[in-house]
Amino acid sequence: MATMADVARHAGVSVATVSHVLNDTRPVLPHTRQAVLDAIETLGYTPNGLARSLVTARTRSIGLAVSAISNPYFTEILQGVEASALEYGYSLLIADPHDDPVHERKVVQLLHERRVDGMIVAPSADPRDLIGYLGRHGVPTVFLDRLVDDVPAPGFPFDQVSAENTEPVTRLVTHLAELGHRRIGLVAGLAGLSTTSERITGYRLGLAGAGLAYEERLVIPGNSEAAGAERATQALLSLPAPPTALITANNAMTIGALRAVRARRVSVPGDLALCCFDDFSWADLFSPRLTAISQPSKEIGAQAVRLLLERLDSPGRPARTVRLPSAFVHRTSCGCPESCPEKGTVS
């Protein structure tokens, strides 16, 4: 197995120069750097990651704390994070905070103790302890999906990336209203999450734009999970004047809503038009096919990695929040025929 000394001899440079090229710890002339890289390629040299971390004070690892990893949406985000991290030569350490603020704080501390270079976190509904810990220890962090603009972190910048949430839901409501629906229900997400509040805002804006009154009883929390959405949908269908159309605010809740609809023998879209936030790979296989808002989940993950690496390279730059557009995937569960246009970007 080739050593660093072998690379140095082959390139005609010192071992120190090879180290500087590998660890980027000092500028090296372009032709010298290329000679070292060519020697590494020729000899098949594999750098010692542990030794490199001791030199650079970096482990080239990223901590990822994402709840509900079994959720297809977060699974795709994980794929985006992993692919981008690998592209830049980073490994991942993954933990599931279970949307519990206490557990969230513990797993983030454990990741930090493993000396990750930075964190990517989908925060819980109450991230105050999390942010306090990250701020005190100066951990470079990117929040994804759920934004934390209302939680101050004085003197320490956090970058964030999320899809658009408000306008896409407004578009769903507008579409249903244009189809003639006047009682449109919403199975909302977990209280306290930015995604939940933004999607409720979009729902209300859509109603207002269609000249429809907001009725509190038509919005029931499904707590961002299937069982809660099943109960919420049952409650909505049990109203004296139930909704004729329903929007579910994430893909897990769509599954719960469909269970409730089946249990009540309600026909979709004959008795109830259905639209959902979050598309997923088998949404096109349901009968009827599910009209949905598709988030760029893999790109959200990839963007989070890029933001984190920018933060590592420029610790003092101002915080950035990146919003990515979603797509309106027009199928048939809303009551439209198969011939309707399929997609449109919502920014």
Image (cartoon, rainbow, N blue to C red):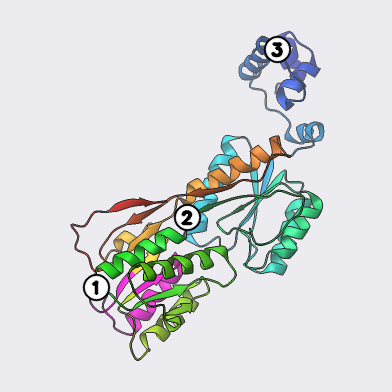
The Cα–Cα distance between marks 2 and 1, rounded to whole angstroms, is 26 Å
Residue that appears at 46% across and 76% down: 229
Q: Amino acid at mark 2?
A: Glu
Residues under numbered marks 2 and 1 in contact, where contact means CB atoms less than 8 Å apart: no
Residue that appears at 34% across and 75% down: 212
The Cα–Cα distance between marks 1 and 3, rounded to whole angstroms, is 69 Å
- Between 217 and 99, the residue placed more toward the observer is 217
Q: Secondary structure at mark 3?
A: loop
Determine if the magenta segment contains residue 251: yes
In the image, farthest residue toward the top: 12
Which image quadrant is residue 33 in? top right
Q: Name the quadrant of the N terminus.
A: top right
The x, y position of residue 321, in whole percent, is 58, 49
Q: Earlier in the sequence, mark 2 or mark 1?
A: 2
Residue that appears at 55% across and 40% down: 84
Q: Secondary structure at mark 2?
A: loop
- Between 132 and 234, the residue placed more toward the observer is 132
| Chain part drawn in magenta | 246-274
> Marks 1 and 3: which is nearer the front?
1
Q: Which residue is mark 1?
A: 180
Left or right placement of residue 324 versus residue 149 in this view: left
Q: Earlier in the sequence, mark 1 or mark 3?
A: 3
Q: Which residue is mark 2?
A: 164
Q: Amino acid at mark 3?
A: Leu
- Between 19 and 329, the residue placed more toward the observer is 329
The x, y position of residue 135, in whole percent, is 77, 53
